[in-house]
Amino acid sequence: MASPPFSTSFFFILSLCSTATMMLFTPVASLTCTSQKLRSNERYSNCIDLPLLSSYLHWTYNSSNSSLAVAFVAAPSSSKGWVSWAINPTGAGMVGAQALIAFKNSSAMTVKTYNISSYQSIVPGKLSFDVWDTKAEESGGLMMIFAKIKVPEKKDSLSHVWQMGPSVTNGMPDQHAFAPANMKSKGTLSLSGGQSTTSGGVDSTTKKKNIHGVLNAVSWGILFPLGAIIARYLRTFPSADPAWFYLHASCQVSAYAIGVAGWATGLKLGSESKAIQYSGHRNIGIAAFCLATLQIFALFIRPQKDHKYRYYWNIYHHSMGYTVIILGIINIFRGFDILRPEQKWKTTYIIVIAALGGIALFLEAITWIIVLRRKSNKSTKPYDTYNNGQSRQQPLAA
């Protein structure tokens, strides 16, 4: 059987990967605040479609007594989740926020007040300003918080924050996600109903998390598997020798370099977040890094093909390599669960890794056909000869 040209097989792999990464998905449209029918008898002068977390805010400011009547509407992460709206009188963001959190307690909706003084202290407590007429409702998968709040006199705007979480344990809201949408759900509310703004751009921590995720997905999740495919299958074709080895080595060294950068970024993020630790994700990352480092150093003690220890080196090299790939892919999906980016990014990665798996299966079948035909035409020995009698190990024997 004639061997397909090396370049055709290699560029076939790259073209499929490129096609998969170009796929995008269309977002689903949502309701607007003006179309919502609130069950409360309260009528509000203003409303806004908050730009993140599919949330809405209705409010009326009474300048005669400096009070603010609000209705916050959002769909929780799950039916057993919680939603929250807060004012931060001292800054922007979570720390210092005076929060109203609503969730279902047994079968009834309830709303509690939380003075969030720090990330480690999130317990029910009295707010720094007066609040009354608080209640919570649920309708059509949406949770609603109603309240009236005393605001400082002669105040034109307020810093507000909104959030949602997946569950409640023993009457306490569980940790929310740390996706970009969750981290950026804050802004400035104009009490008079003028244009309200939200925080622009991405904060430094979220940017570091995104960089960490991209570097690791490209290195551990794509380049390492691609390098293994090159080594296992392309060397079957005589026209690819010795180019397959240099491509394999270049791919794996590049993957390692990018992976080290992603790993170091992860360590930096962990050191900056003492209160929130992802032990499983961290431990798998450390294990993958250590094994990959051993793989790199093993290149410097690689025996010659005819050396008596080459067989054992091959067993070590292959087992460590496949272990690194498996750990890397597992940890990437753990990272998706932690970072919670838009679904299209996780779907795109699934398509890419599935494409690589499909390519591997296709080339596995081709390789078996080539090997079996060679054996039927020559002999059943695990080695064939080429280039003036030099022995070459069949790829499936290792």
Image (spheres, rainbow, N blue to C red):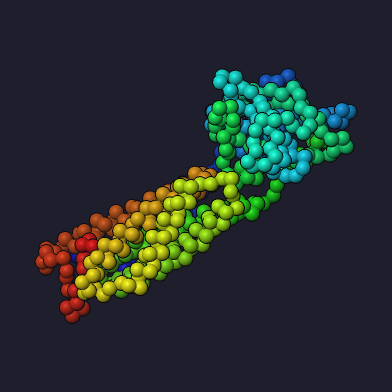
Query: Does 364 sit left or right of 219 as displayed?
Result: left
Residue 8, quarter of picture: bottom left
Q: Nearer the viewer, residue 332 or 241?
A: 332
Q: Nearer the viewer, residue 146 or 290?
A: 290
Residue sitting at x 29%, y 62%: 316
Is residue 186 in view?
Answer: no
Quadrant (top left/top right/bottom left/bottom right) for the C terminus = bottom left
Query: Does 225 sit left or right of 57 as displayed?
Result: left
Residue 162, quarter of picture: top right
Q: Position of residue 151 (x, y in %)?
A: 82, 33
Residue sitting at x 84%, y 39%: 156
Q: Position of residue 109 (x, y in %)?
A: 62, 22
Residue sitting at x 39%, y 52%: 327
Q: How many marks?
A: 0
Quadrant (top left/top right/bottom left/bottom right) for the N terminus = bottom left
Q: Position of residue 247 (x, y in %)?
A: 37, 69
Residue sitting at x 44%, y 64%: 256
Q: Position of residue 12 (x, y in %)?
A: 36, 61
Q: Nearer the viewer, residue 165 or 137?
A: 165
Q: Looking at the image, which residue sits at the far bottom?
A: 388
Query: Does 337 sit left or right of 202 as displayed?
Result: left
Is residue 378 in view?
Answer: yes
